[in-house]
Amino acid sequence: MTTESQSQQTPSSARDDRPLLPIAARRHRFVAEVKRKLLARCEVRNADPLLVAVSGGADSVALLGACQVLSHRKSHDYNIKSVVAVHVHHHLRDSADQDAEFVQELCDRLGVQLIVKDIYPGKEPGNIAANARDLRYEALTQAARSVNAFNIATAHHGDDQLETILIALCRGAGVDGLSGMAWTRPLEDGLALVRPLLGLRKANCLAFCQMAELSWCEDPTNSDPTQVRARLRRDVLPVLEELWPDAASRATSAADAMAIARHALNAQLQKTFGDDNSLSWNRSDIALLPLPIIAAGLRRAAIAGHPNIADSLGQSLLNQAAEAICSDDRSPKEYHWPGGVILMVTSKQIQMK
C-alpha cells in the first residue's frame, strides 16, 4: 500500500536565490567524490532531475547536501541541473513522523523539492521487512516517474557494503551475493538506482554534515543489537578495522572484482545452461563442465523459480548433485531441496521441477 502524502515544489527561480552551504562545505572533498562517482561509476550524466532518497540519517543528508551543491554549479564537464528529494514514510516507528518533518525542514532550508511517499508494510500479509523493501522500491519508482527522473540516488556507503558482503558470506551466498551492492542497477525501463557513496565511508558522511552545519536523525534500529547489521557494527566491524584499516573501502574494491567474475560466470551459464528459466538439460553435455560451474548453473535455475530459497540452498547440496552428474553411476537419482525444488538425474537427462 503506497500513498503520497505531500509534495512541495520549489520553483527554480526561487531555488537559485537560496543561500548555499558554507563555502568550506561546498569545497569539501566529499562533494567532488560524489560528482566523480555519479559520472564515472553511476553514469549519471546531467540528469534532470536527480531524485535523492532521504531518510533523514546522516548518510542521506550528506548525499542530498552534496547534490544540492552540485546543482548550483555551472560546470562544463558535469552538473546536476536540479535535485528532487523523496522521503519514504514507513509508519513502523513512533519517531517516523518526526523524521518526515525533519526531512521537510531540511529540504525547505536547502530549497529542494520534496516528495513524501507513505507506505504501510505492517498492514500487508507476510514478512514486514520484505514488505517494506518491496513497497519502498515501488514508492521510489512512483516518485521518479512523477518528476520524470531517470535516476534515484541512495546513500548506501562502503560500511554498508562491507556489512552486506559479510552477511552474504555467512549465508553461503554465491558470486551474486558476494558481489555486494552494485553501483547502479535498473529498476525498470529507463529508470536506475544509483549508489554514488559506495566508495566513501560513514565517517566521510558525518564529516561533511558537520562541515556543512547539517543535522540529522538517528534511527534507533541502527543501534539495536538484536538486528544483524547493528550487531555487526558494534561487535565485528571495529575488530576488522583494527586488523585491516579501511576494511570497508577494501570490501568495495573486492565487490567490484567479484562483479566482474559474476559477469563472466553468468555468460558461461547462459551458454551452457541456457536461460535461467530452463529446467532440463542433456546430462552428457553438462557433465563436461567443471563442478563449480555445474553447481552454479543448478543454483541459478533453482533460485530463478524460487527466490526465497537463496539462503537455504547450501553449497553442499549443490556439490552433491554436481558430483552425481559427473560420476560414472548412471542409476537415477532424485534430490529434494528447500522450497519443494526437486532435481532428477537420469542416465541421459537432468530435470528440475
Image (cartoon, helix red, strand yellow):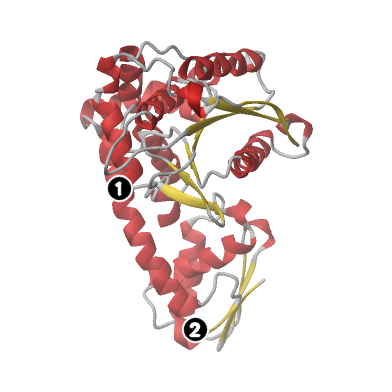
Residue 91 occupies quadrant: top right
**For the residue labelled by badge 1, is the local secondary structure a helix, a strand or a loop?**
helix
- Tell me which residue sits at (29%, 18%) in the image: 25
Q: 312 or 333, which lies in front?
A: 312
Say which residue label 1 marks.
40
Q: Position of residue 279 (x, y in %)?
A: 61, 75
Left or right: 213, with 243 as reference point: right
Q: 59 or 340, which lies in front?
A: 59
- Tell me which residue sits at (65%, 64%) in the image: 341
Left or right: 180, with 224 as reference point: left
Q: Quadrant of the N terminus?
A: top right
Say which residue label 2 marks.
329
- Tell me which residue sits at (51%, 84%) in the image: 283
Q: Are marks 1 and 2 in contact (CB under 8 Å)?
A: no
| Neighbourhood count class around disc 2 (C-alpha, 10 Å): few under 14, some 14–19, many 20 upward | few
* Image vertical order of residue 43 relative to residue 267, above or below: above
Mark 1 or mark 2, which is nearer to you?
A: 1
Can residue 33 be seen from the camera position used here? yes
The three-letter code of the residue at mark 1 reads Ala
| Sequence order check, earlier mark of 1 and 2 | 1
* Image vertical order of residue 23 relative to residue 197, above or below: above
Residue 164 occupies quadrant: top left
Q: Position of residue 230 (x, y in %)?
A: 47, 24
